[in-house]
Amino acid sequence: MARMTAQPASDAATSGPAAPRSRLWAVVLAACAGQFLVVLDVSVVNVALPSMRADLHLSGTGLQWVVNTYTLTFSGLMLLGGRAADLFGRKRMFLVGLALFTAASLAGGLAQQPWQLLAARAVQGMGAAVLAPATLTILTTSFPEGPARTRAIGTWTAVGAGGGAAGGLVGGLLTDALSWRWVLLINVPVGALVLAGAAVWFAESRADGARRRLDVPGAVLVTGGLAAVAYGIVRTESAGWTAPDALGPLFAGLVLLGAFVAVEARTAVPLVPLRLFGHRSVSSANAAIFVNGLAMFAMWYFLSLYTQNVLDYTPLQAGVALIPHSLSIVLGSKLAPRLMARIGDRGLAMTGSALAGLGYLWQGAMDAQGGYLDTLLGPGIVMALGAGFAATPLATIATSAAAPRDAGLVSGLFNTCRTMGGALGLAILSTVAASRIAGDETPGALAAGYARAFQTGAAVLFACVLFMALALPKASRRP
C-alpha cells in the first residue's frame, strides 16, 4: 500500500499542482482501495443471495434486506462518518471504520439466524460509513479542478465498478467451493492485513480549525427516516397501499425526514448545510444521481436472482456471466473524461442515462427461456456502459462548485444520494416485481416479475434524462 506523506493541518494546503505527481497518484491508489473494498461488499453478496435464503430460510422480503440493511446504514451515516474524519483525523477514523467492518464481517459469516445476519450487515454498513467518505474527498482536495481531477474521478469511478466485477466472480467462487459464509468471512484476513498496513504507513490529517461537533441527531433522523420509508414500501406488497401496516411506516419515515430538515436548518454544525443546495450544480447533480440510483442499483440484484432462480446457473456461473456488465461500467467510466471534452458534462450525463434506459427496456423483455447473448450479455453491456458514462460527469458537476472548506461535505453528499437512491430503488422495484410474481415461484412467473422491475427502471431513467435536460447547468467541456 502506498505510503501517505504527512500533510499540513489545512486541507487546502494539500491541493494544487505543487504536490509531487508521484504522491498525487499514490493518493489516488489509497482512495480507490477504500472505494473498492466498500463496493466489493455489496456485489460479493448478490451472487450468494439464493444460497443464503436456502440455508437460513430467509423470506423474499428478508432477502432484499440483506442488501438494504447494509446500504441504508451505510448511506445514512456516511455524512456523519465524513464529518468525523475531518474533525478527528482521517487515519484514525479509517482504522475505526475498517475494524468495525471486519468484525461485523466475521459475525455475519458465523450467523445462524436471519436476524443475526441482518444485524451484522447493519454494523458492516456503519463501518463502511466511517471508512468510505474520505475516498472522493481525498481526490477533490488533492487535485485542482481541471483535467487531472477529472481523470482521478474517472479512475475512482472505474475502480468502484471494478469492485462489482470482482465481487461477482469472487462471490461465485467462494459460494460454489466453500459456502455463502465465505463471501463475508473473506473480509476478515483482508481487513486485518489492510489495518496493519494502514497503521504503519498512513499519516494523520484533519481539517484545520474545525469545531469538534458531530450532528448525531441529524444522522439518526435521516437513517431512520429512509429505513422507515423503505420498510413501508416493502409492506405494500402484502398489505396494500392503504393498509395501516404500510401507511404507518411511510408516514413515520416522512415525519423523521421532515424533522431532519428542521434540525439541519437550526443546528450550528449541520450534517448537511442546506446552503449547499443553493448551488444549482450541487442540487441538480445530486438529485440526478439519486434518481439514477433508484434504477441502476437494483440491476445486480435482479440479474443475480434471474440467472440462478430462472436460468438455473450455479453461483460461479452467475458471477462469471455478470463480469462483462461490470467491465462495461469500468470502460464507460474511463472513456467518460474524453467524451466530456467533446459533448460536455451535461450532454454525457444525459446520453449515459438514456443509453442505460434503452438497456433496461431490452432487459425487460427477458423470459424463462432466455439465452446468454441476447438476454444477458447484450442488454447488460448497454445498461452498464450507460451507467459508466453517467457517473463521472455527475460527480464532476456535483463537486465543481464546492469551496475547499465544503469539499468533504459535497463529496459525501454525492455518495450518500447515490446509495440512498439505490436502497429505496431496490425496495420499490422489489415490490413491483413481487406484485407481478404474486407468490408463484415458477421460472416463468419469476422472469415476468424481474422483467417488470426492469421496465419500471427504464421509465425512471428516461424521466431522469428529462430532469437533467431541464435542471443541470448548461454543458461545459473539459479539456
Image: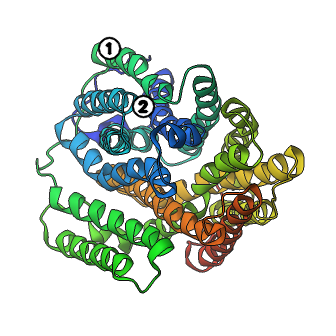
Identified by mark 1, the residue type is Ala
Answer yes or no: is residue 344 visible: yes
Q: Secondary structure at mark 1?
A: helix
Task: Identify which residue is drawn at 17% across, 71% down.
Answer: 263
- Tag 2 residue: 18
Occupied quadrant, residue 94: top left
Q: Is residue 310 left or right of residue 197?
A: right
Callout 2: few (<14), some (14-19), or many (20+) C-alpha neighbours within 10 Å?
A: few
Q: Residue 171: x and y, percent? A: 58, 30
Q: Is residue 242 above or below residue 166?
A: below
Q: Nearer the viewer, residue 125 or 436?
A: 436
Callout 1: few (<14), some (14-19), or many (20+) C-alpha neighbours within 10 Å?
A: few
Q: Is residue 225 left or right of residue 290?
A: left
Answer yes or no: is residue 152 visible: no
- Tag 1 residue: 196
Q: Secondary structure at mark 2?
A: loop
Q: Nearer the viewer, residue 299 or 261?
A: 299
Q: Residue 176: x and y, percent? A: 63, 25
Q: Residue 438: x and y, percent? A: 62, 69
Q: Is residue 33 left or right of residue 102?
A: right
Task: Identify which residue is drawn at 18% across, 42% down.
Answer: 87
Coloring applied to the structure? rainbow
